Image (spheres, rainbow, N blue to C red):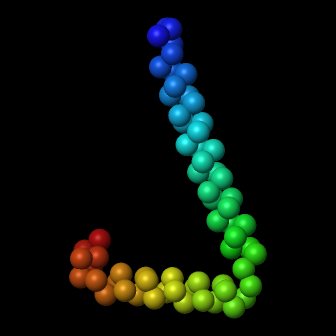
Amino acid sequence: MAPGGGDLWLLMTVLGVSLLGITIAYAAFKSRQNMTPAKRDVADRGAERVYAEEQRDPANRGA
């Protein structure tokens, strides 16, 4: 392997992971923007239900 080749792999990995994260965040943001009010209400109620279940779980009390 050429000298500095490991640096290139590291740089490409970091850039790839960063690009993937940005793409996922953008897609999540856009899908949330395009929701109808009824779909948003359903999603919010579901999230509240999940959070309430997590709070009732004794394993999460000490966190």
Q: Position of residue 45 (x, y in %)?
A: 54, 89
Q: Position of residue 13 (x, y in %)?
A: 53, 34
Residue at the (51%, 82%) spot, across then down: 47
Residue 37 position by quadrant: bottom right
Residue at the (47%, 10%) spot, across then down: 1
Residue at the (64%, 65%) spot, across then down: 28
Answer left or right for 25 relative to 1.
right
Residue at the (47%, 19%) spot, across then down: 6
Q: Which residue, as the protein is rendered here, is positioned at the far front?
A: 1
Residue 18, placed above or below residue 10: below
Answer left or right for 61 relative to 15.
left
Residue 8, placed above or below residue 54: above
State how many labels appear. 0
Q: Nearer the viewer, residue 51 or 46?
A: 46
Q: Position of residue 36 (x, y in %)?
A: 74, 85
Residue 31 position by quadrant: bottom right
Residue 30, placed above or below residue 41: above
Q: Position of residue 17 (x, y in %)?
A: 55, 43
Residue 25, placed above or below residue 58: above
Answer left or right for 31 relative to 9.
right
- Quarter of the image where the C terminus is located: bottom left
